[in-house]
Image: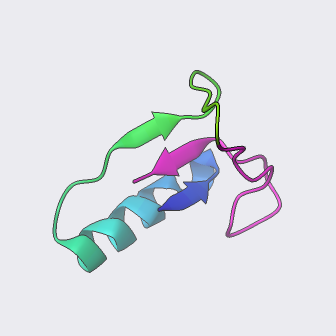
Amino acid sequence: MYVVCKDHLELAIDQFVDEYEDAPDIVDLEETRFPAWEPPAHCERCQEKARFLVV
């Protein structure tokens, strides 16, 4: 699972495919809320706002 900004989305997708040999699901964190999980505020690769969950 990766939580990234728009700039790092493609890199996270590539990393997911390399690791799991399958296409990920991509969740837009601005449109989806999870009742039992609060996503990180920042991208795991930089300090930009986290926008996508790659899982």
Is 52 on the left or on the right of 55, as rendered?
A: right
Is 40 on the left or on the right of 4, as rendered?
A: right
Residue 51: within the magenta? yes
- The image quadrant where one finds the C terminus is bottom left
Residue furthest toward the front?
36
Residue 19: within the magenta? no
Residue furthest toward the left?
21
Tell me where residue 34 appears, x and y as whole percent.
60, 32
Q: Is residue 21 above or below residue 24?
A: below
Residue furthest toward the top?
31
Is 17 on the left or on the right of 48, as rendered?
A: left
Q: Residue at x 33, y 44 (%)?
A: 25
Q: How many marks?
A: 0
Overall secondary structure of the magenta section: loop
Tell me where residue 40 appears, x and y as whole percent.
75, 53
Q: Residue at x 37, y 72 (%)?
A: 15
Residue 30: quarter of image: top right
Q: Which residues are the magenta region?
A: 37-55
Tell me where residue 18 appears, x and y as whole percent.
26, 77
Q: Residue at x 50, y 53 (%)?
A: 9
**In front of the other: 30 or 46:** 30
Q: Is residue 54 above or below residue 46?
A: above
Q: Residue at x 78, y 55 (%)?
A: 42
**In front of the other: 34 or 22:** 34
Tell me where residue 48 appears, x and y as whole percent.
79, 53
Q: Is residue 5 above or below residue 15?
A: above
Colour scheme: rainbow
Residue 16: quarter of image: bottom left
